Image (cartoon, rainbow, N blue to C red):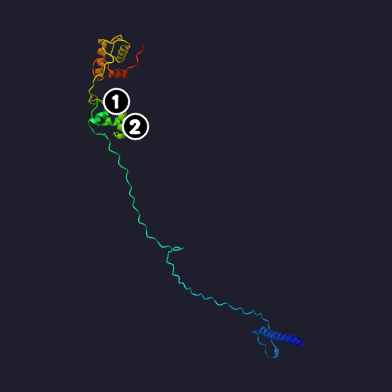
Amino acid sequence: MKRASRAKAAVAAVVVTATVVSGGAYAASQFAGSETVPAGGAGPRPTRTSQTPDVATPEPATATPSSTTESPESPGAPDGPTTESEPPSTPVETTRTAPPPPPPPLIAAQDSGTKVRELQGRLKQILWYYGDITGQYGEPTVEAVTGFQVKRGLPSTGEVDRRTWQRLLGMTRMPTYNEMHNILVPGPTIIGPEDDGKDVRDLQARLAQIAWFDERVTGYYGEVTTAAVTGFQTKRAIPTTGEVDQRTWDRLLEMTEQPGE
């Protein structure tokens, strides 16, 4: 017990001694930097100056040079990652295939010959061509072909291509030699001399409408009726037989009206 008490007393003495020493040092520091007291104790009372404990001023940090040296940016260099530029690609030339030209017409303007006569003869059958067949593909034939094409929804070129020709063949027959050379041959007689009856009365009445028959309608096909039919045929460039064939009758129907009873 005594030893323990002595040990504690020794520790306490050490602590007191340290306190006194440190207190003296602190007191001395309080008066450091104050005015010197003159001899004899006279003079102003020293003023306690508060001391700010010294704070270690950090030295400016010195930049450690980087191990990697950056190259200065070139003027105008874009921001962001730099990618290697690829060489411009060479444009591939493409060849466009032009559409094939249309096939030449089978019969065209300024053509002439038998084929043109056939064309004109076929167009005449369906009333697209009028006048004599000449064998010359001139303006009248161009107009006839153009009208035919427009009517059927075909390209209106005025020239005969394969489609136009095939359509025309399907609507007409092959003209005869006489037709293609303007040689009129009378057809079979449908009303002629010595006939009588209703058909003759109808014929006489129609001829009277266009001033070719000025006698009383009798219904008998005699010399007066024969003369009237001959004059009508001559005037219309129909073979003059004095007898009524189909061509004569059709032309008369076009120019007259149905007679009354």
**Can you identify the residue that label 1 sits on?**
125
Q: Residue furthest front?
A: 1
Query: Dot 2 corresponds to which residue?
Result: 150
16, above or below 171, in the image: below
Residue 55 place in picture, x, y as percent? 61, 78
Tag nearer the camera, 2 or 1: 1
Drawn side of residue 51 relative to residue 124, left or right = right
Answer whether labels 2 and 1 touch (C-beta < 8 Å).
Answer: no
Residue 141 lies in quadrant = top left
- Label 1's element? helix
Could you classify mark 1 by the number of other residues whose Cα lies within 10 Å: few (under 14), some (14-19), or many (20 or more)? some
Mark 2 crowdedness (10 Å alpha carbons): few <14, some 14-19, many ≥20: few
Q: Quarter-wise, where is residue 24 in the image? A: bottom right
Q: In which quadrant of the rendered view does residue 152 lie? A: top left
Residue type, label 1? Gln
Q: Residue at x 29, y 18 (%)?
A: 246
| Residue 129 visible, this orientation | no
Residue 246 visible to an observer of this rendering? yes
Helix, strand or loop at label 2? It is helix
User: How far is disc 2 from disc 1 in space, using C-alphas?
Assistant: 18 Å
Left or right of 26 on screen, residue 105: left
In the image, residue 235 lies at what x, y percent? Answer: 25, 18
- Tell me the amino acid under the disc marked 2: Val
Q: Nearer the viewer, residue 207 or 104?
A: 104
The first of marks 2 and 1 along the sequence is 1
